[in-house]
Protein backbone atom coordinates (compact mmCIF):
# COMPACT_ATOMS: atom_id res chain seq x y z
CA UNK A 1 0.00 0.00 0.00
CA UNK A 2 1.12 3.50 -0.72
CA UNK A 3 1.95 5.62 2.27
CA UNK A 4 4.30 5.80 5.17
CA UNK A 5 4.63 2.72 7.35
CA UNK A 6 6.19 2.43 10.77
CA UNK A 7 7.09 -0.77 12.55
CA UNK A 8 6.62 -2.04 15.11
CA UNK A 9 3.47 -0.29 16.37
CA UNK A 10 4.29 -1.18 19.96
CA UNK A 11 7.59 -2.12 21.56
CA UNK A 12 8.68 -2.84 25.11
CA UNK A 13 12.40 -3.02 25.74
CA UNK A 14 14.74 -3.05 28.69
CA UNK A 15 17.07 -0.29 29.77
CA UNK A 16 20.41 -0.56 28.02
CA UNK A 17 19.20 -2.51 25.02
CA UNK A 18 19.55 -1.33 21.45
CA UNK A 19 16.30 -0.96 19.55
CA UNK A 20 15.55 0.09 15.99
CA UNK A 21 12.34 1.67 14.80
CA UNK A 22 11.61 1.29 11.12
CA UNK A 23 10.08 3.77 8.71
CA UNK A 24 9.26 3.13 5.07
CA UNK A 25 7.59 5.47 2.56
CA UNK A 26 6.41 4.72 -0.95
CA UNK A 27 6.18 8.23 -2.40
CA UNK A 28 9.90 8.75 -3.02
CA UNK A 29 9.72 11.88 -0.88
CA UNK A 30 13.10 13.52 -0.48
CA UNK A 31 12.62 14.67 3.10
CA UNK A 32 12.09 12.39 6.07
CA UNK A 33 11.86 13.18 9.76
CA UNK A 34 11.69 11.52 13.16
CA UNK A 35 9.68 13.14 15.93
CA UNK A 36 8.91 12.08 19.46
CA UNK A 37 5.65 12.99 21.13
CA UNK A 38 5.45 13.43 24.88
CA UNK A 39 2.57 14.73 26.95
CA UNK A 40 2.80 18.49 27.35
CA UNK A 41 5.64 18.83 24.84
CA UNK A 42 3.91 18.39 21.53
CA UNK A 43 6.27 16.95 18.92
CA UNK A 44 10.01 17.41 19.07
CA UNK A 45 12.33 16.76 16.14
CA UNK A 46 14.99 14.11 16.69
CA UNK A 47 16.64 13.83 13.26
CA UNK A 48 15.84 14.65 9.69
CA UNK A 49 17.10 13.77 6.25
CA UNK A 50 16.99 15.85 3.07
CA UNK A 51 17.98 12.95 0.79
CA UNK A 52 19.67 9.56 0.84
CA UNK A 53 22.93 9.69 2.78
CA UNK A 54 22.17 13.20 4.11
CA UNK A 55 21.03 13.44 7.71
CA UNK A 56 21.12 16.13 10.37
CA UNK A 57 20.29 16.60 14.02
CA UNK A 58 17.08 18.09 15.26
CA UNK A 59 16.12 19.43 18.67
CA UNK A 60 16.64 16.25 20.75
CA UNK A 61 19.17 13.96 19.01
CA UNK A 62 21.12 12.62 21.99
CA UNK A 63 20.95 8.85 22.35
CA UNK A 64 19.63 8.30 18.83
CA UNK A 65 21.24 7.31 15.54
CA UNK A 66 19.74 7.41 12.04
CA UNK A 67 20.76 6.25 8.61
CA UNK A 68 19.34 6.67 5.15
CA UNK A 69 20.99 4.43 2.62
CA UNK A 70 17.82 4.31 0.48
CA UNK A 71 15.37 7.12 -0.19
CA UNK A 72 12.39 5.10 1.06
CA UNK A 73 13.79 3.96 4.41
CA UNK A 74 14.77 5.98 7.46
CA UNK A 75 15.39 3.78 10.52
CA UNK A 76 15.88 5.26 13.99
CA UNK A 77 18.11 3.43 16.45
CA UNK A 78 18.28 3.92 20.18
CA UNK A 79 21.82 2.83 20.96
CA UNK A 80 21.25 2.10 24.66
CA UNK A 81 17.65 2.69 25.64
CA UNK A 82 16.84 4.73 28.75
CA UNK A 83 13.53 5.24 30.54
CA UNK A 84 13.48 8.87 29.39
CA UNK A 85 13.17 7.57 25.83
CA UNK A 86 9.76 6.08 26.59
CA UNK A 87 7.60 7.95 24.10
CA UNK A 88 5.56 7.75 20.94
CA UNK A 89 7.76 8.08 17.87
CA UNK A 90 6.49 9.42 14.58
CA UNK A 91 8.15 9.23 11.23
CA UNK A 92 7.14 11.82 8.64
CA UNK A 93 7.97 12.66 5.07
CA UNK A 94 7.61 15.67 2.79
CA UNK A 95 7.98 15.84 -0.94
CA UNK A 96 9.16 19.34 -1.69
CA UNK A 97 9.85 20.45 1.85
CA UNK A 98 7.71 21.07 4.93
CA UNK A 99 7.54 24.82 4.34
CA UNK A 100 5.18 24.49 1.41
CA UNK A 101 3.58 21.14 1.89
CA UNK A 102 3.73 20.23 5.54
CA UNK A 103 4.28 16.62 6.55
CA UNK A 104 2.72 13.23 6.02
CA UNK A 105 2.99 11.20 9.20
CA UNK A 106 3.09 7.50 9.91
CA UNK A 107 0.87 5.95 12.57
CA UNK A 108 3.59 5.96 15.19
CA UNK A 109 5.52 3.52 17.36
CA UNK A 110 4.76 3.46 21.06
CA UNK A 111 8.01 2.58 22.82
CA UNK A 112 8.21 1.67 26.49
CA UNK A 113 11.59 1.30 28.17
CA UNK A 114 11.44 -0.63 31.44
CA UNK B 1 13.68 31.82 19.87
CA UNK B 2 10.63 30.89 17.88
CA UNK B 3 7.76 29.29 19.75
CA UNK B 4 4.17 28.19 19.43
CA UNK B 5 1.66 28.48 22.26
CA UNK B 6 -1.69 26.77 22.23
CA UNK B 7 -3.66 28.60 24.84
CA UNK B 8 -6.04 25.80 25.80
CA UNK B 9 -4.99 22.26 26.64
CA UNK B 10 -8.59 20.99 26.51
CA UNK B 11 -11.74 22.36 24.92
CA UNK B 12 -15.05 20.64 25.65
CA UNK B 13 -17.95 21.64 23.40
CA UNK B 14 -21.41 20.35 22.57
CA UNK B 15 -22.16 18.89 19.17
CA UNK B 16 -23.26 21.45 16.54
CA UNK B 17 -21.78 24.32 18.57
CA UNK B 18 -19.01 26.53 17.13
CA UNK B 19 -15.46 26.13 18.36
CA UNK B 20 -12.24 28.14 18.30
CA UNK B 21 -8.85 26.66 19.15
CA UNK B 22 -6.32 29.35 19.89
CA UNK B 23 -2.72 29.49 18.74
CA UNK B 24 -0.12 32.21 19.17
CA UNK B 25 3.34 32.13 17.71
CA UNK B 26 6.54 34.09 17.92
CA UNK B 27 8.73 34.38 14.90
CA UNK B 28 11.24 36.90 13.66
CA UNK B 29 11.05 35.76 10.06
CA UNK B 30 8.38 35.10 7.49
CA UNK B 31 5.83 32.72 8.89
CA UNK B 32 4.45 29.55 7.48
CA UNK B 33 1.72 28.19 9.74
CA UNK B 34 -0.05 24.88 9.94
CA UNK B 35 -2.77 23.07 11.83
CA UNK B 36 -2.71 19.31 12.18
CA UNK B 37 -5.27 16.90 13.64
CA UNK B 38 -4.46 13.66 15.44
CA UNK B 39 -7.16 11.06 15.96
CA UNK B 40 -6.61 8.40 18.66
CA UNK B 41 -3.78 5.99 17.90
CA UNK B 42 -3.01 7.68 14.59
CA UNK B 43 -0.40 9.98 13.17
CA UNK B 44 -1.00 13.67 12.52
CA UNK B 45 -2.90 14.79 9.42
CA UNK B 46 -2.58 18.18 7.81
CA UNK B 47 -5.78 20.24 8.25
CA UNK B 48 -4.71 23.50 6.62
CA UNK B 49 -1.76 25.79 6.07
CA UNK B 50 -0.97 29.47 5.65
CA UNK B 51 1.94 30.32 3.39
CA UNK B 52 0.97 33.76 2.04
CA UNK B 53 -1.96 35.64 0.54
CA UNK B 54 -5.43 35.67 2.04
CA UNK B 55 -5.39 35.65 5.82
CA UNK B 56 -8.42 33.36 5.97
CA UNK B 57 -7.45 29.81 5.13
CA UNK B 58 -9.91 27.01 4.55
CA UNK B 59 -9.02 23.41 5.25
CA UNK B 60 -10.53 19.97 5.29
CA UNK B 61 -13.54 18.86 7.32
CA UNK B 62 -15.03 22.38 7.42
CA UNK B 63 -12.21 23.93 9.45
CA UNK B 64 -10.75 27.35 8.76
CA UNK B 65 -8.08 29.50 10.36
CA UNK B 66 -7.28 33.19 10.32
CA UNK B 67 -3.77 34.56 10.26
CA UNK B 68 -3.44 37.75 12.27
CA UNK B 69 0.01 39.25 11.91
CA UNK B 70 -0.46 42.07 14.40
CA UNK B 71 -1.61 39.68 17.11
CA UNK B 72 0.74 36.88 15.99
CA UNK B 73 -2.16 34.46 16.09
CA UNK B 74 -3.48 31.66 13.92
CA UNK B 75 -6.71 30.51 15.53
CA UNK B 76 -8.61 27.51 14.20
CA UNK B 77 -12.40 27.64 13.90
CA UNK B 78 -15.33 25.52 12.91
CA UNK B 79 -18.91 26.84 12.89
CA UNK B 80 -20.55 23.54 13.85
CA UNK B 81 -18.65 20.58 15.28
CA UNK B 82 -19.47 16.89 15.09
CA UNK B 83 -18.71 14.03 17.44
CA UNK B 84 -16.17 12.83 14.87
CA UNK B 85 -14.15 16.03 15.36
CA UNK B 86 -13.05 14.77 18.78
CA UNK B 87 -9.27 14.67 18.47
CA UNK B 88 -6.11 16.51 19.38
CA UNK B 89 -5.18 19.54 17.32
CA UNK B 90 -1.66 20.89 16.86
CA UNK B 91 -0.61 24.29 15.66
CA UNK B 92 2.82 24.46 14.03
CA UNK B 93 5.18 27.04 12.55
CA UNK B 94 7.89 26.32 10.02
CA UNK B 95 11.12 27.88 11.27
CA UNK B 96 13.46 27.27 8.33
CA UNK B 97 16.12 24.68 7.71
CA UNK B 98 13.45 21.98 7.23
CA UNK B 99 12.38 22.36 10.84
CA UNK B 100 8.94 22.95 12.29
CA UNK B 101 7.95 23.79 15.86
CA UNK B 102 4.75 22.24 17.15
CA UNK B 103 2.54 23.48 19.95
CA UNK B 104 1.71 21.23 22.89
CA UNK B 105 -1.70 20.41 21.44
CA UNK B 106 -5.35 21.12 22.27
CA UNK B 107 -7.66 18.23 22.97
CA UNK B 108 -11.10 18.91 21.51
CA UNK B 109 -13.85 16.89 23.12
CA UNK B 110 -17.25 17.05 21.43
CA UNK B 111 -20.16 16.02 23.61
CA UNK B 112 -23.56 14.80 22.41
Image (tube, rainbow, N blue to C red):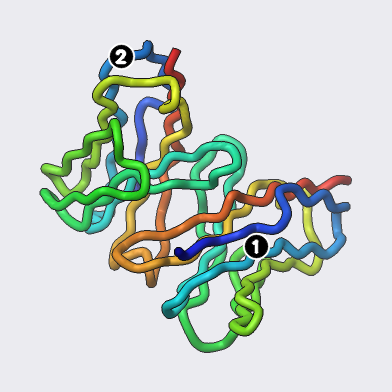
Secondary structure of the residue carrying numbered label 1? helix
* Relative to A111, residue A73 above or below: below
Residue drawn where x is 43% and y is 80% of the image: B30
* Horizontal relation, residue A92 to residue B55: left or right: left
Q: Which residue does the image show at 54% across and 44% down from the upper left? A: A41
Q: Give how far across and how far down residue B22 sits, in percent.
A: 70, 64
Can residue A44 be seen in this snapshot?
yes
Q: Which residue in the structure is indicated by mark 1?
A: B61
Pick the front one: A42 or A93: A42
Taking the view exactly as shown, the residue that stands out farthest to the front is B1
User: Taking the image as drawn, is residue B84 in sight?
Assistant: no
Q: Nearer the viewer, residue A86 or A91?
A: A86
Residue furthest bottom in the image: B53
User: What is the chain letter for disc 1?
Assistant: B
Image position, residue A6 (x, y; %): 36, 35
The residue tagged 2 is A16
Which quadrant of the figure contains the C terminus of chain A? top left
Q: Nearer the viewer, residue A68 or B22?
A: B22
Q: CA distance from mark 1 to mark 2?
A: 44 Å
Q: How many marks?
A: 2
- In the image, which disc is placed on residue B42? none
Q: Chain of mark 2?
A: A
Are discs 1 and 2 located on one and the same chain? no
Amino acid sequence: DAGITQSPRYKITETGRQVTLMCHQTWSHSYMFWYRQDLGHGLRLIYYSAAADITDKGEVPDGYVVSRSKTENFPLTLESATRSQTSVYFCASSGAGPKDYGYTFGSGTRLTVV
Amino acid sequence: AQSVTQLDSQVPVFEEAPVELRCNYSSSVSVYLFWYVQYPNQGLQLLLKYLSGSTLVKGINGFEAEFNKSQTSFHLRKPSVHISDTAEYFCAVYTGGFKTIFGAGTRLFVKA
